[in-house]
Image: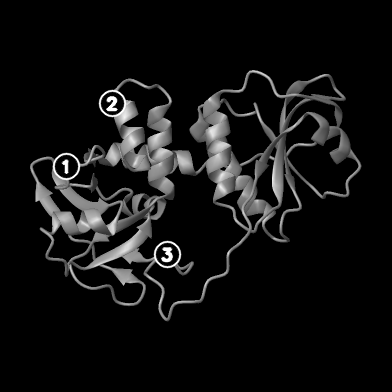
Amino acid sequence: MQSLDQAYGAMQAGDASAGLRFYRLLADATLFLLLEREAEDARVDPKVFDLPDGPVLLAYDSEERLAVMAGGGGGLPYAALPGRLIAQQMLGQGLSLGLNFGTGAVSEVLLPPEALRWLCEMLEAAPVEVEATPAQFFAPKGLPEALSDALTFTLGGAAGLARAALLAGVRYSDGRLGHMLAVMDARPGAEEALARALSEALVFSGLEAGELDVTFLASSDAVVVALARVAVVFEVPDLLVQAAVERAAPGMDGKPPRLR
C-alpha cells in the first residue's frame, strides 16, 4: 500500500495520530489533478464534477491510479501539483476534492470544503522567534513517536538544505526546560524555509506549540560538542542533481498555477 493508503486506513481504524499524518502526507504529495483541457502555460482548468454533495475536483496520488480511473485508456489531461497547492487554490470556492476516486484504493475519499479549509489553516503555522540561552543539554525524553516520524519526513524532503539536525532536551539559563532541534550547516538563504517546514512538522505531530525550539548552528560552534553527546541525529539527504527537463509541469517550477 502507498503511504496515503496506510495513513487513511489507520485513521479509519481509530488511530488518533493517523489523521494528522494523512493530511501531512496529502499536503506534501504530488497529486495528479484531472483537467478539463490541457494546461496552458501556468493556467490550469480543473474538471468539475457536479455530484449530489456538490462540485468536486478529482485528484490521484499516482499516474497509475489516474489511468485506472480512465479505464486504462489514458489520454486524460492532468496537472501534477503539490497537494497543498491544490487545497490552497480551492479554498473558499465551495469545492470538494475526490481523492483516488474510481480506483478502489483504501484512500478513496471525498474531502469536503471544511476539511480543505482546516488543512490550509494548519499549513499557515508560522514559527515565532524568541531568544534563550541553553545552560545544559540532556537526552530527549517523553517525545511521541509522531514527532520523530514528522521530523524524519520533513528533513528527508530537505535534501541539500542542511547537513543534519540534532534533537536534545535542554535547560535554559532562566530555568525553563524543553527540547531543542539544532539544524546543522543550513544552506545560505534556506533557514526561513526550513523553520517554516519544521513548524509544520510540529503542528502535524500533534504537539502543542512551544514544546520544540528550533535553532541553526554551524558545525564549528562550540556548543555543538556538548549537544552532540546526548542528541538524537536526523540525517538530511544530499542533493541529487538531475538533468533539467525541457518544460516543467504546471506548479512544479516555483510559479503557482491559477485554477480557473
Task: Give the spatial CA distance, label 1 vs label 2.
Answer: 15 Å
Q: Which residue is drawn at 42% across and 81% down?
A: 246
Classify 10 Å Cα crowding around label 3: few (below 14), some (14-19), many (20 and above): some
Q: Quadrant of residue 175?
A: top right
Q: In this orientation, which residue lies closer to the viewer: 192 or 150?
A: 150
Identity of the residue furthest to the right in this view: 222
Q: In which quarter of the image is residue 109?
A: top left
The kind of residue on which mark 1 rests is Gly
Comparing labels 1 and 3, the label whose residue is closer to the camera: 1
Identity of the residue furthest to the left in this view: 52
Q: In which quarter of the image is residue 23?
A: top left
Instruction: Please identify the quadrant where the C terminus is shown.
Output: bottom left
Counting every numbered tag in the picture gives 3
Label 2: element kind: helix
Query: 55 left or right of 203?
Result: left
The kind of residue on which mark 3 rests is Pro
Q: Residue at x 27, y 41 (%)?
A: 113
Task: From the top left corner, tell me how far across and down residue 74 is, in percent.
Answer: 16, 66
Query: 204 left or right of 92?
Result: right
Q: Say whether disc 2 or disc 3 marks the residue closer to the N-terminus.
A: 2
Tag 1–tag 2 contact (CB < 8 Å): no
The kind of residue on which mark 2 rests is Gln
Comparing labels 2 and 3, the label whose residue is closer to the camera: 2
Label 3: element kind: loop
Residue located beneath label 3 in the image: 256
Q: In this orientation, which residue lies closer to the viewer: 41 or 136?
A: 136
Residue located beneath label 1 in the image: 104
Q: Which residue is drawn at 22% across and 53% down?
A: 65
In the rendered structure, find residue 12 and report the number of the disc placed on it: 2
Query: 69 left or right of 198?
Result: left
